[in-house]
Image (cartoon, helix red, strand yellow):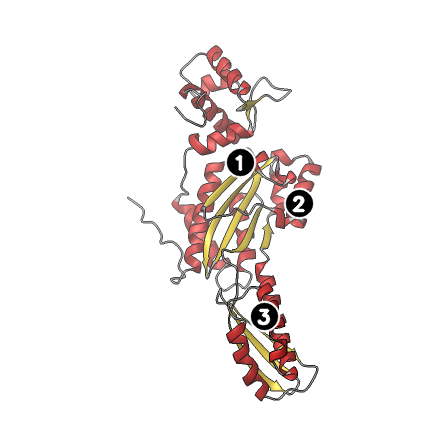
Amino acid sequence: MDEMHPELSERKKLILKAIVDAHIADGEPVGSKYLMETKQIPCSSATIRNEMAELEALGYLEQPHTSAGRIPSPKGYRLYVNELMERKDIDGEEADAIRATMQRELRGTDQLIARTGQMVSSFMDYPTYAVTDHREVATVRRFELLYVDALSVISVVMLSDSRVKSTLLHMELPLQEEALQSVSPLLNTHFTGLTQQQMHAKLMNLTDQVAPENFLLLNRVVDYAADLLEETSQKQVYVGGASQLLKIPEFRDLDKAHDLMHFMSDSSAQLPIPAGDAPMQILIGPENVSEALKESSVVVASYDIGDGMRGLVGVVGPTRMDYAAVAARLSFFAESLTKMFGKAQQLPPKEEQTP
């Protein structure tokens, strides 16, 4: 017997699964007669009614005011997702369509992460969001300085995630080219592998050890590098397909739809970003921290970008969403994106069709 749900018999679980499957399919409350006639539950209508009443008392079902039928509660959906849901795989035709769209939309695109959310939404019919997240705190791996003229220096910074950034620094006082030969070793000796806060502390410690004319350049380069690290620490969140909410029956109330669309566009930083390396996480209704998501569910999948970075793509929808179908599509997208960012830069191989 299940340790998490010791009160549930196999018959109760069978009835709960049937109710969730039926409610996901059409969004209507489910009655005992429907279950007996269409789901072939091997017991009488009266027995099913009694079991449904007990499931409601235990918190797995809810009864809308205007209906004799029941709908799943968040607790019922949680048991369904954890134990009762039949796992799905996308079919070959849909897999081919996803591959083709990814090859067309994502390759060679500077805004790859942003486009990912929009593309996933088109296959899900739900709003989505895409996030870049650093598993590790980024630092500077190497500095280089390039002399332009007495008042201009190019600062090149290679970060620990292999990104390279550069900027043209305009100096307030004329600078000799020899100054770069003094400052570059200082940067690479004292300021690599440090956090933003450590860099500023180290700079203060060197105030009396560096010539004033060189310290100005050192200070400008360190400030630029610290700004890069600050920028890198900020998670970038891109929202796509928010208008898909208007197609969902649960959001026919325009005020309700507007509130969630407003939250996704203006408060995207509060969308769930799971900690750890779990490949997928499903948050149902009240399990979401943000009040705006308490009546919605979120499915988030993780993929590997490389160089200490991961990407997340999430789907926001009603608690009645088809969790198995959403999870199957997100898993395929995550696997495909991991391969795109890998050394091979290839999508998952096309599966051979059995005759």
Q: Please name the amino acid that badge 2 sits on.
A: Phe
- Image quadrant occupied by the C terminus: top left
According to the picture, the residue beneath numbered tag 3 turns out to be: 202
According to the picture, the residue beneath numbered tag 2 turns out to be: 263
Disc marking residue 321: 1
Q: Where residue 165 sits in the image (x, y, percent)?
A: 55, 71
Is residue 100 something that shows in the picture?
A: no
Query: In 3D space, how far apart are the residues under numbered discs 2 and 3 (Cα atoms)?
Result: 41 Å
Quick one: SS at disc 2?
helix
Is residue 200 something that shows in the picture?
A: yes
Mark 3 Cα-neighbour bin, 10 Å: few <14, some 14–19, many ≥20: some
The tag earlier along the polypeptide, 2 or 3, is: 3
- The answer to whether residue 110 is above or below residue 283 is below
Residue 297 vs residue 169, the one in the foreground:
169
Q: Is residue 175 left or right of residue 332?
A: right
Q: Please name the amino acid that badge 3 sits on.
A: Lys
Mark 1 Cα-neighbour bin, 10 Å: few <14, some 14–19, many ≥20: many
Residue at 51% over, 14% down: 49
Mark 2 Cα-neighbour bin, 10 Å: few <14, some 14–19, many ≥20: some
Query: In 3D space, how far apart are the residues under numbered discs 2 and 1 (Cα atoms)?
Result: 19 Å
